[in-house]
């Protein structure tokens, strides 16, 4: 009980990234005996963690979003003003021109809310094989500015990865806000209408499932079958893959864990479910994350915690050096257990 009181006292202090990192690093477990992620890596001869070839260039275009989801590790919302400027985007374009990077992965917030979003997609499409946009779907239904996004996405053959916590309104709206499910369904119908999710078009839309509580996701394969069946039968909606992503103890989800007194149990679930086989596929091995200012990070989660790159690696987009990045040491902390628990978790879903 003393621990829970201390956690509640700490909750209001975790508004900044350093406080979150300090909190995660401190352990604060009553049970005792919990290992650090570094210790477990060392046990499996995987420390220090090293990357493979850089394939994915993940750019956060800003933290502004039309939603305020309870599980959001970015703490995104309509009141966030952090937006990547065109000058930084041009630096990203120069990197894509000069290096053989396969995929540009655009995220946010809602990346579409960046005023230079369409220009960036159009320009970058000349230099990469694939562009991913992580869309929350409801942006398409938010106002007239975004009504033509389905046609724009189709024209540039953008691959969409879109959040849909569940195939019914209750669970979806509980996590993402009232009316979100209805708007998401309308957006999916419009995306299907321009060809997304249909094998003959080559236009890919994948859905993302995040658990609504303090537990690990179920089998990605089983959930995909359920989602496909229900969405087809009830709404005549089709999609390609379903990605199950584990909620990491960062930002709003960390607040939720503390407020509901689930923090300690959830962390033990992650630690006890550690799967060494998932290490080979963790996204930090083939991805570099760029924040709205142009700073470089090992992954999107490290970006939100402001855990900077290895000091021998370039720190910003203006100093980009793919050789140094491919030879860096990846920075890890306790939140990394979320990516290696069970079937593993990445921005492309389960790893196994």
Image (cartoon, rainbow, N blue to C red):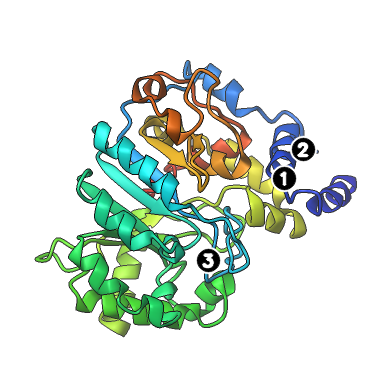
- Looking at the image, which is closer to me, 143 or 159? 143
Q: Residue 143's spot in the image, x, y percent? A: 44, 82
Q: Residue 341's spot in the image, x, y percent? A: 50, 40
Image point 50% across, 45% down: which residue?
291
Vertical placement of residue 278 versus 260, above or below = above
Q: Is residue 346 visible?
A: no
Image point 39% across, 83% down: which residue?
144
Instruction: State which mark lies toward you, 2 or 3.
Output: 3
Using the image, tell me which numbered label, if any, was put on residue 264: 1
Could you tell which of marks 1 and 3 lies nearer the N-terminus?
A: 3
Proximity of marks 1 and 3: CB atoms separated by less than 8 Å: no
Mark 1 falls on what kind of element?
helix
Residue beneath disc 3:
65
**Which residue in the rendered view is the most extreme toward the front?**
87
Vertical placement of residue 116 versus 247, above or below = below
Quadrant of the snapshot with the C terminus:
top left
Image point 69% across, 31% down: which residue?
34
- Looking at the image, which is closer to me, 306 or 98? 98
Q: CA distance from mark 2 to mark 3?
A: 34 Å
Instruction: State which mark lies toward you, 1 or 3.
Output: 3
Q: Quadrant of residue 58?
A: top left
Mark 1 surroundings: few (<14), some (14-19) or many (≥20) residues within 10 A: some
Q: CA distance from mark 2 to mark 1?
A: 6 Å
Residue beneath disc 2:
29
- Looking at the image, which is closer to me, 186 or 155? 155
Could you tell which of marks 2 and 3 lies nearer the N-terminus?
A: 2
Vertical placement of residue 132 versus 285, above or below = below
Could you tell which of marks 2 and 1 lies nearer the N-terminus?
A: 2
Mark 3 falls on what kind of element?
loop
Q: Quadrant of residue 184?
A: bottom left
Mark 2 surroundings: few (<14), some (14-19) or many (≥20) residues within 10 A: some
């Amino acid at each position: 009980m003393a621990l829970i009181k201390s956690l509640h006292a700490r909750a209001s202090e975790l508004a900044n990234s350093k406080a979150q990192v300090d909190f995660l690093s401190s352990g604060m477990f009553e049970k005792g005996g919990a290992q650090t992620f570094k210790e477990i890596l060392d046990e499996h001869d995987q420390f220090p963690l090293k990357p493979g070839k850089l394939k994915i260039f993940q750019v956060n275009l800003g933290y502004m979003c039309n939603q305020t989801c309870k599980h959001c590790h970015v703490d995104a919302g309509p009141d966030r003003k952090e937006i990547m400027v065109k000058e930084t985007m041009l630096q990203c374009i120069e990197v894509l021109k000069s290096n053989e990077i396969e995929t540009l992965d655009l995220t946010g917030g809602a990346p579409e809310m960046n005023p230079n979003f369409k220009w960036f997609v159009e320009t970058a499409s000349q230099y990469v094989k694939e562009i991913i946009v992580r869309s929350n779907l409801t942006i398409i239904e938010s106002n007239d500015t975004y009504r033509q996004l389905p046609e724009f996405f189709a024209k540039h053959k953008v691959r969409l990865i879109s959040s849909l916590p569940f195939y019914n309104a209750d669970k979806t709206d509980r996590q993402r806000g009232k009316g979100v499910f209805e708007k998401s369904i309308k957006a999916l119908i419009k995306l299907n209408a321009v060809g997304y999710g249909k094998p003959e078009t080559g236009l890919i839309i994948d859905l993302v499932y995040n658990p609504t509580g303090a537990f690990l996701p179920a089998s990605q394969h089983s959930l995909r079958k359920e989602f496909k069946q229900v969405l087809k039968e009830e709404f005549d909606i089709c999609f390609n893959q379903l990605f199950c992503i584990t909620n990491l103890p960062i930002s709003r989800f960390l607040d939720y864990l503390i407020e509901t007194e689930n923090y300690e149990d959830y962390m033990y679930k992650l630690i006890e479910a550690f799967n060494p086989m998932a290490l080979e596929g963790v996204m930090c091995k083939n991805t570099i994350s760029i924040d709205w200012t142009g700073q470089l990070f090992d992954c999107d989660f490290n970006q939100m915690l402001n855990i900077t790159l290895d000091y021998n690696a370039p720190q910003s987009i203006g100093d980009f050096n793919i050789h140094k990045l491919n030879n860096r040491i990846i920075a890890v902390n306790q939140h990394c257990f979320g990516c290696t628990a069970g079937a593993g978790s990445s921005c492309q879903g389960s790893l196994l």
